[in-house]
């Protein structure tokens, strides 16, 4: 079992006051780091919003297929709306256990926007992955989903702006010619930021599960659920995962009197201690990182590594769901990731003058689902 690593943790108040030390930032994001920073003392409404939205993840994943099909956007390579069975795992098998719902967070900048603003180079025809409008479930299908989604994303981006401000303080002292306030401006004004709500469906136990699990550990092959990868944005905001026993609390849409869906019961801990986020450290060691329920974590992405000239490093990571043989009931794992990313025309490589749109297009092409 991989060791548990303790991420650098800072207070939201210190971020607001600009008192997070440069040493702490380097320890969190620098060349020898785990590439993750945990923020505590977040706004009081975070806990309720997290519980509500991650409950919606189970409600969404259990909608009839006909409803979920309406939320798919194949042209956008499923980077807006719902997808299931469109990704392949490390072993080449189709991933039928992870449902994914993407939404553009352009509403953070302008509530009237449903996706990034087109540029002279990028438009809905040649870059639909970033320029396709959101596909929200109808209010009658999933009442309260959209406002809850938007409210939690706004809160996480607000905190990401403060993390970016701290990163700018570091970069301005460490990088010659670094534009003052660059990353904060990118995160605060971007219309390309995306959020991904994930629903890891309950696994069905089989007689061979235990032996398969043992073999994986012996071979060191633990990232078959979500293969090791790098995020390609700047800062990825993460909630802790919510584990739900969908047998005990079935996610059946039955609106309450106020028109929203009641939050589902959350298990106090993961029934499988190996489920969760894993990071490949700079030394090649795989470690597990646990995010406290009342905190928001931020991971580094490739765009941030380029923007800082390698002073901050992108973090390779993967996720494991709860294994069926480790739990009684039907245990689902729900979580949210918010990928703060530059606008399509913003430069992420100031020496080679590469825009984020050019960089992201290359990443999308590499990751295209066949």
Image (cartoon, rainbow, N blue to C red):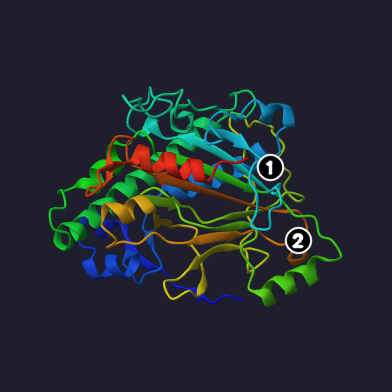
Q: Secondary structure at mark 2?
A: helix
Q: Position of residue 316 (x, y in %)?
A: 47, 61
**Total number of numbered discs in the rendering:** 2
Which residue in the protein does label 1 denote? 85
Q: Are marks 2 and 1 in contact (CB under 8 Å)?
A: no
Q: Is residue 18 visible?
A: no
Residue at image coords 33%, 44%: 158
Q: Distance between the Cα atoms at labels 2 and 1?
A: 19 Å
Q: Hey, which quadrant is residue 135 in on the image? A: top right
Q: Is residue 52 left or right of residue 282?
A: right
User: Residue 129 bears which disc, if any?
Assistant: none
Q: Hey, which quadrant is residue 207 in on the image? A: bottom right
Foreground residue among 92 and 194: 92
Q: Quadrant of the C terminus?
A: top right
Foreground residue among 89 and 201: 89
Foreground residue among 356 and 174: 356
Q: Position of residue 50 (x, y in %)?
A: 50, 47
Q: Hey, which quadrant is residue 308 in on the image? A: bottom left
Q: Secondary structure at mark 1?
A: loop
Q: Position of residue 31 (x, y in %)?
A: 33, 68
Foreground residue among 323 and 93: 93
Q: State whether residue 101 is above or below residue 124.
A: below
Residue at image coords 53%, 31%: 76
From this viewpoint, which residue is outermost toward the front? 352
Q: Is residue 143 visible?
A: yes
Which mark is first along the chain, 1 or 2? 1
Which residue in the protein does label 2 denote? 324
């Amino acid at each position: 079992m991989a060791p548990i690593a303790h991420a650098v943790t800072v207070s939201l108040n210190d971020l607001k006051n600009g008192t997070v030390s440069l040493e702490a930032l380097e320890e969190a994001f620098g060349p020898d780091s785990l590439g993750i920073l945990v923020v505590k003392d977040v706004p009081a409404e975070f806990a309720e919003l997290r519980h509500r939205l991650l409950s919606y993840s189970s409600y969404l994943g259990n909608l009839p297929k006909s409803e979920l099909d309406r939320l798919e956007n194949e042209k956008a390579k499923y980077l807006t709306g719902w997808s299931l069975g469109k990704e392949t795992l490390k072993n080449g098998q189709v991933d039928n256990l992870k449902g994914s719902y993407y939404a553009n967070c352009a509403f953070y900048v302008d509530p009237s926007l449903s996706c990034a603003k087109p540029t002279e180079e990028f438009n809905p025809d040649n870059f639909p992955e970033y320029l396709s409008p959101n596909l929200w479930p109808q209010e009658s299908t999933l009442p309260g989903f959209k406002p809850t989604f938007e409210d939690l994303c706004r809160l996480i981006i607000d905190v990401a702006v403060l993390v970016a401000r701290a990163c700018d303080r570091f970069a301005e002292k460490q990088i010659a010619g670094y534009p003052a306030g660059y990353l904060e401006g990118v995160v605060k004004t971007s219309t390309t930021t995306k959020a991904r709500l994930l629903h890891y469906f309950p696994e069905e136990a089989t007689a061979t599960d235990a032996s398969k699990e043992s073999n994986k550990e012996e071979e060191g092959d633990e990232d078959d659920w979500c293969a090791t990868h790098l995020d390609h944005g700047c800062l990825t905001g993460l909630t802790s995962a919510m584990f739900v026993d969908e047998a005990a609390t079935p996610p059946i849409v039955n609106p309450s009197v106020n028109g929203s869906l009641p939050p589902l019961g959350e298990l106090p801990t993961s029934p499988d201690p190996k489920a969760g986020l894993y990071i490949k450290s700079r030394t090649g060691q795989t470690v597990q990182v646990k995010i406290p329920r009342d905190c928001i974590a931020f991971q580094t992405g490739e765009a941030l590594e380029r923007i800082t000239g390698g002073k901050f490093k992108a973090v390779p990571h993967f996720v494991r769901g709860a294994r069926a043989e480790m739990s009684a009931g039907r245990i689902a794992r729900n979580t949210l990731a918010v990928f703060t990313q530059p606008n399509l025309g913003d430069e992420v490589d100031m020496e080679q003058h590469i825009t984020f749109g050019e960089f992201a297009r290359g990443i999308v092409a590499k990751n295209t689902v066949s």
